[in-house]
């Protein structure tokens, strides 16, 4: 029995149709990856299934007792809340008890209510929740429970949102790029956690190794249609190639038939009668089929060249801090032409802030940044670009 069903759902933005008449179901324990080229509507479909957007047509139904968690690509967490408050935001009674226990042990350990809460936890056998919650927070490096969400980097916010989704223990987890901002150890732990879980899973990810290890079915969104493949990503690649070869053969066959029908129409332009009309209508249908092509997504970039001097960027005694947290302290460096530099470090150390200072989106506390006279920055942000619906 399906825990979630989609029936003939469609979605468009203006004249751009993302998909239409999609019908499918998710069963208990099924682990599905949704894949497709960028812009085909994967994130939109996830939001529709999670109830955050409405389809233009069709309907989504869930089993009455199903609990669902959704991890968006860019979590929208309340900035005024602490990490602790967000992580324990749940309607599960056992989790609420653990939240009360943790809060009282930190703020009022002598409170009579603490004894009452402990008795309730033991009666519900809810200590396993505490162990699981602490494991999730530890493995995802969420070790800053008292910090405000507004103080966190994008990577830290994604980890907090992921921890919250896992702690909820839902029947179905819908995830959009869950491995973004995770280090290798956290990804490997998440792989094991999800692959051994009895929960249903629907995810979008560009991490093919992660996808290959935990999914048992692939949904491919291609040209507004949904294709299903039983198996992991490696199996999908084989079957997708077979499907495309078959489509190519069908297109070539339609083209040959179309050419023959066109020749017949040229030889008998004055033909009348039902048979002639039937062949004319069939020729139009063949024309549509013959025009079908499977186009791989290609991007052509035209870049205007300009002469770049020897100095690209000069940084002297740069300093930036948030409160007592020093992100950059007395940093000096000169970037030269043809330099290829990677910036690494754990979440929250200031990598994004450093880039924002370079491109002028954020001011340093002290120090100077001098950009070469002919230099123009191209900056791809962590959150990507924002396009209007008609673009």
Image: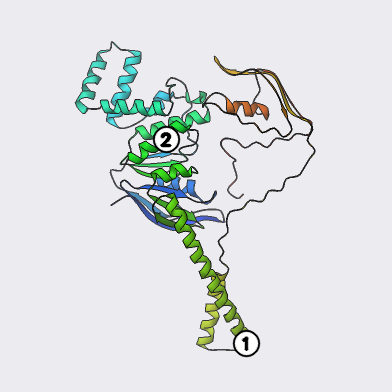
From the image, tell me which residue sits under label 2. 188
Q: Is residue 127 above or below residue 226?
A: above
Residue drawn at 22 percent across, 18 percent down: 116
Q: Residue 87: which quarter of the image?
A: top left
Q: Is residue 41 above or below residue 89?
A: below
How far apart in space, not on screen, are marks 2 and 1 (Cα)? 67 Å
Q: How busy is the neighbourhood of tag 2: few (under 14 within 10 Å), some, or many (20 plus)? A: some
Q: Is 47 on the left-hand or right-hand side of 15? A: left
Q: Earlier in the sequence, mark 2 or mark 1?
A: 2
Do callouts 2 and 1 mark residues in contact (Cβ within 8 Å)? Answer: no
Residue placed farthest to the top in the image?
110
The answer to whether one can see residue 323 in this image is: no
Give coordinates of residue 2: x percent, y percent.
31, 51
Residue 321 image position (x, y, % from top left) = 59, 18
Q: Is residue 333 visible?
A: yes
Residue 267 circle label:
1
Tag 1, which secondary structure? Answer: helix
Element type where label 2 sits in the image: helix
Q: Is residue 330 left or right of residue 47?
A: right
Q: How is the image coloured?
A: rainbow
Whether 246 is drawn above or below 332: the answer is below
- Viewer-nearest residue: 181 or 2: 181
């Amino acid at each position: 029995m399906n825990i979630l069903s989609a029936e003939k759902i469609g979605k468009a933005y203006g004249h751009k149709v993302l998909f239409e008449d999609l019908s499918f179901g998710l069963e208990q324990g099924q682990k599905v990856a949704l894949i497709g080229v960028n812009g085909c509507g994967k994130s939109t479909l996830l939001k529709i299934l999670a109830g955050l957007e409405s389809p233009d047509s069709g309907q989504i139904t869930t089993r009455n007792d199903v609990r669902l968690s959704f991890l968006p690509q860019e979590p929208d967490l309340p900035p005024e809340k602490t990490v602790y408050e967000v992580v324990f935001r749940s309607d599960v009674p056992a989790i609420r008890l653990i939240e009360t226990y943790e809060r009282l042990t930190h703020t009022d350990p002598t409170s009579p209510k603490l004894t009452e809460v402990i008795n309730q936890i033991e009666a519900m056998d809810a200590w396993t929740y505490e162990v699981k919650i602490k494991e999730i927070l530890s493995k995802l490096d969420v070790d800053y429970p008292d910090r405000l969400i507004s103080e966190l980097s994008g990577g830290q916010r994604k980890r907090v949102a992921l921890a919250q989704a896992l702690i909820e223990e839902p029947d179905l987890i819908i995830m959009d790029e869950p491995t973004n901002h995770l280090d290798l150890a956290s990804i490997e732990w998440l792989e094991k956690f999800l692959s051994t879980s009895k929960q249903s899973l629907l995810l979008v990810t560009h991490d093919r190794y992660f996808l290959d290890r935990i999914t048992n079915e692939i949904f491919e969104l291609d040209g507004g249609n949904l294709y299903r493949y039983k198996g992991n990503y490696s199996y999908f690649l084989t079957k997708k190639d077979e499907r495309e070869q078959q489509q190519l053969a069908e297109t070539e066959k339609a083209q040959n038939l179309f050419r023959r029908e066109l020749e017949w129409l040229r030889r008998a332009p004055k033909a009348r009668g039902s048979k002639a009309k039937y062949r004319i209508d069939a020729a139009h249908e063949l024309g549509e089929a013959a025009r079908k092509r499977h186009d791989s997504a290609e991007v052509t970039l035209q870049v205007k060249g300009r002469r770049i001097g020897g100095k690209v960027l000069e940084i002297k005694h740069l300093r930036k801090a948030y409160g007592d947290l020093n992100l950059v302290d007395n940093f000096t460096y000169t970037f030269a032409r043809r330099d290829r530099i990677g910036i690494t470090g754990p979440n929250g150390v200031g990598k994004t802030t450093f880039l924002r200072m370079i491109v002028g989106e954020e001011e340093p506390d002290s120090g100077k940044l001098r950009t070469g006279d002919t230099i123009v920055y191209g900056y791809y942000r962590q959150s990507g670009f924002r396009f209007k619906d008609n673009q």
